[in-house]
Amino acid sequence: MIGRNDPCWCGSGKKWKKCCYPNEDVSASSNKIPTSSFETLRAAYKKHFDILLKTPEDIEGIRQACKLAADILNELCAAAKPGVTTKELDTLSRKLHKEAGATPAPLGYGDPPFPASICTSIDDVICHGIPNNTPLKEGEIMNIDVSPIFNGYFGDCSRMVGIGAISEEKQKLIDVTYDCLIKSCEILKPGVPIYAIGDKICDVAHKENYSVVHQFVGHGVGLQFHEAPAIPHHKNSCNIELAPGMTFTIEPMINTGKAEGEIDPENEWVAYTVDGGLSAQCEHTILMTDSGYEILTPWDQ
Ligand code: MF3
Ligand code: CO
């Protein structure tokens, strides 16, 4: 769990307690939430947790942004071959966003402003890799992260792609990371506490002796890029209950070695594993429904 004095998960650079921290003690308020109607639930989630439960109209907009995110991601992954540069993938991404009438949310995001339209994170990069002019090499594994703004709504997803043929070790890491995402989705229904997501991801990853990154977390998404709540992938005690109308990401980052990452001091974005171990990630945007969940970013595996 990130501490109240740690930098906020939303990338604002402010302390969590001064930024997206829920404005009341979570455990104290969870059992006071009225569930008589969607409107009372919505007001309570906003007041207690600053969580926006989306209306049917919001959901329609978010659904379209998410579909576009998955389509662009599929196309970028298909283009990721040995010899292609990540800069070229970024150029293709900008074109695809533009043709769709969308804006890439990462471009200019945060402080210092993120310099590209997608993140491309190779081998020992945990996340926030910046596209550059180095050609992709056979055997590398890369995460591509796509988050368009479409008609004012945000979608967010990412997946791994192998560059040419990859080793069994790398394929296994990718498969287990995918399993972490899908198995943690399968437990989702209204009333399930947020900590159950991290529990499931840890079960799957630790069984294979992998570690789960705790410095970066999933997040509410839809009306903004990063909304409350934080969705930790590691063991945590966030007992806010999932509720219909929540839209959020699950985006586990799984390492072969230590969980810790260090951020490149030159660009203040790219996060490398401290020990040079491999890291993989995949991400969906999820909608909570009355009885379960829906994956809004159905990218091809
Ligand atoms: N899915 C990533 C996230 O939610 C996308 C990062 S884009 C960046 O943080 F601009 F923040 F790098
Ligand atoms: Co995300």
Image: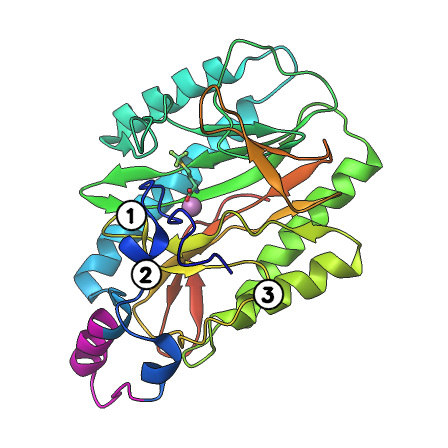
- Circles 3 and 2: CB distance less than 8 Å? no
Q: Which residue is mark 3?
A: 235
Q: Residue at x 26, y 39 (%)?
A: 149
Q: Badge 2 is on which residue?
A: 21
In this rendering, is residue 12 above or below 251?
A: above
Sequence-wise, the earlier of marks 3 and 2 is: 2
Identify the disc placed on residue 5: none
Residue 290, given in percent of the width and then of the height, sits at 35, 78
Query: Do tag 1 and tag 2 residues touch (Cβ < 8 Å)?
Result: no
Circles 3 and 1: CB atoms closer than 8 Å: no
Instruction: List the single residue furthest toward the right.
Output: 168
Q: Amino acid at mark 2?
A: Tyr
- Marks 1/2: CA distance? 29 Å
The C terminus, quarter of image: top right
Residue 236 appears at what percent x and percent y? 54, 67
Q: Which residues are magenta?
A: 32-47
Q: Does label 1 or label 2 sit earlier along the sequence? A: 2
Please check the rendered image and state whether residue 43 is part of the magenta-colored stretch, yes or no: yes
